[in-house]
Amino acid sequence: HLAQMEFEVAEDDELRRDLAMAIESLPESYREVVVLRDLEGLTIGEVARRLDTTRAAVKGRLHRARELTREYLIAN
């Protein structure tokens, strides 16, 4: 069981590193919505207010940012 737990921890660490690199690779406008929404847990409305933009713009950027993140992870 200990070996299995160590393997899972190693996989989690690798996933965290891969995600961090994927997020870092995003253009700033996409990176900021991902960080605010997915890492800091702000709502779409809160992100829109913080960035002084519309909810629709946040949703669009977030969707594209997640697509780019997926593409990065698949490619690497």
Image (cartoon, rainbow, N blue to C red):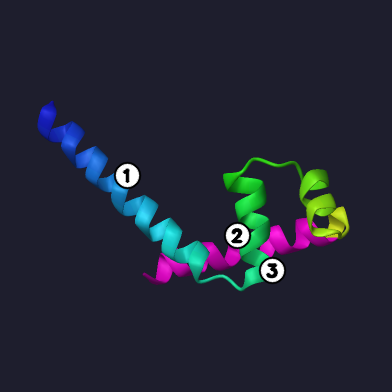
Q: Quadrant of residue 45?
A: top right
Q: Is residue 75 magenta?
A: yes
Between the C-alphas of marks 1 and 2, the distance is 19 Å
Question: What are the residue bounds of the magenta stretch?
Answer: 57-76
Q: Secondary structure at mark 3?
A: helix
Report the residue at 32% width, 44% height from top.
12
Between the C-alphas of marks 3 and 2, the distance is 12 Å
Give the percent coordinates (x, y) of residue 56: 85, 57
Give the percent coordinates (x, y) of residue 43: 75, 41
Q: Quadrant of the N terminus?
A: top left
Q: Secondary structure at mark 1?
A: helix
* Foreground pick, 49 / 16: 49
Label 1: how many Cα within 10 Å (few below 14, some 14–19, many 20+): few
Label 2: how many Cα within 10 Å (few below 14, some 14–19, many 20+): some
Label 3: how many Cα within 10 Å (few below 14, some 14–19, many 20+): few
Disc ID at residue 12: 1
Disc ID at residue 66: 2
Position of 62 relative to 4 (above/below):
below
Between the C-alphas of marks 3 and 1, the distance is 27 Å
Looking at the image, tell me whether mark 3 or mark 2 is earlier in sequence order: 3
**Three-letter residue code for mark 2:** Arg
Left or right, 58 with respect to 69, comes to right
Left or right, 28 with respect to 8, comes to right
**Three-letter residue code for mark 3:** Ser
Q: Quadrant of the C terminus?
A: bottom left
Q: Which residue is mark 3?
A: 29
Report the residue at 78% width, 57% height from top.
58
Give the percent coordinates (x, y) of residue 73: 43, 64
